[in-house]
Image (cartoon, rainbow, N blue to C red):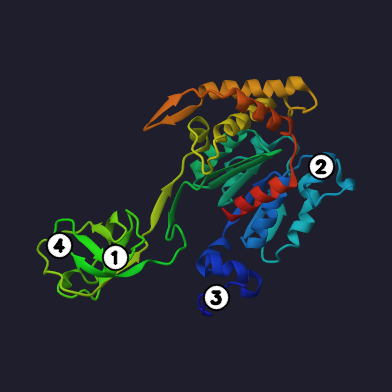
Amino acid sequence: MDAKELKGVDESLYSRQLYVYGADAQRRMQQTNVLLVGLQGLGVEIAKNIILSGVKSVGILDQEPVQISDLGSQFYLKESDVGKPRAECAIGQLTELNKYVNVHHIPVKSGCLMPYLDESVLKNYNLVVLTGKTVNEQIHVNKLCRKLGIMFIAADVHGLLGSVFIDLIELTVKDTNGEREKRGLISSISNDEKAIVTTLDKKRHDLNSGDFVVFTEVKGMKEINKGEPVKIKYKASNQFEIDLDTSKFSKYTTDGYFEQVKMPTTFKFDTLGDQVKRPTFQFYDGFEMECHCLRNAISAFQLKNGRMADPTKQEDVDSLIKFATDFASRVEVSVGEEWKAGYEIDKKKVEKLQRLAIGSRAQITPMTATLGGIVGQE
């Protein structure tokens, strides 16, 4: 990277991530204002990561009193902080992480999050990250963020159960995989409405359907050189079809290269409300729907009882499982191209859910570190 690219970026501080994200992405991050709600074990991991990444500012909102259980995963708290507001106790250490980032806590009375977190507060931020809140609260804030065009992330850790939801509304990505563009020699191009391209010596082209290519140095069929990128369709390891009518082009004679061109891809995101009803998952292990049901059951238990489930009380664990199975009966699952209501949790999987439910009140350090890294990267 030259000096012009790095203008306004502290290369000595951000050297490692510069060569992953690039200078342009780093500059955009330096203009981003983030609101982080919740500063328990997961929240402090996220705060640490986004402050070190070099965003413009981070607002911290958590006036809940420190509890003795927080000390197991929130590394900026100490025993003398018990009873004091979480954000106030940790803001000093967070501020010291990066001199370029404006880290500030937002004072608000304990228990007043939802009335306080309105449009007048949210409009000052580009991204809102919510942790430690019920699904209903997450859906409410997500709706407000959507209305204002603000990106939204919700994340939680409940023992060995973790969840991350991301709503970037609409995102255009220039490079979806970070791999180097494919390039290869060709041996023929047919004269057809959808031409077939064959590589030289049966070499693999390593392209996929939907990729785009351009052609250079082709002899004979000169019309195809340096044209607009054309979409391809995979035919064989050494052949692909191009969405281009070459029937009236000159005949191919020899030589030439195909070169892959990475085209911008736009992703549209669902709201949390939609995803709660019709979930899609980024990680599949055969247990993801059960985890989704338990996550919503934990929230339903909190709303009904005003507290987290007590793992020492069997009636609390049984109540969580009942909430999970009730939710499963209403959730919609994908069957082919259709969505159908109702999901049955297998009896063997109920046993796994019970073990997860027992630890649902805890924030375990390996889990908070892992999910904090994922959210920080997003």
Say which element carries label 3.
Answer: loop
* Marks 4/3: CA–CA distance: 46 Å
Q: Residue at horizontal 78%, vertical 58%?
A: 93
Task: Report whether residue 195 is seen.
Answer: yes
User: Amino acid under label 3?
Assistant: Lys
Whether pointer 4 and pointer 2 mark residues with C-beta atoms closer than 8 Å, the reply is no
Whether pointer 3 and pointer 2 mark residues with C-beta atoms closer than 8 Å, the reply is no
User: Amino acid under label 4?
Assistant: Thr
Comparing marks 1 and 4, which lies closer to the viewer? Answer: 1
Percent x, y for residue 5?
51, 75
Comparing marks 3 and 1, which lies closer to the viewer? Answer: 1
Q: Which residue is mark 1?
A: 202
Horizontal side, residue 307 vs residue 220: left or right = right
Say which element carries label 2.
Answer: loop
Say which element carries label 4.
Answer: loop
Reading the chain from its start, which is encountered first: label 2 or label 1? Answer: 2
User: Amino acid under label 1?
Assistant: Lys
* Marks 1/4: CA–CA distance: 22 Å
Comparing marks 2 and 1, which lies closer to the viewer? Answer: 1
Reading the chain from its start, which is encountered first: label 3 or label 1? Answer: 3
Task: Report whether residue 106 is seen.
Answer: no
Picture disc at residue 66: 2
Picture disc at residue 7: 3
Whether pointer 1 and pointer 4 mark residues with C-beta atoms closer than 8 Å, the reply is no
Q: Residues within 10 Å of mark 3 (few under 14, many from 20)?
A: few
Whether pointer 3 and pointer 1 mark residues with C-beta atoms closer than 8 Å, the reply is no
Q: Which residue is mark 4?
A: 246
Reading the chain from its start, which is encountered first: label 1 or label 4? Answer: 1
Percent x, y for residue 115?
65, 35
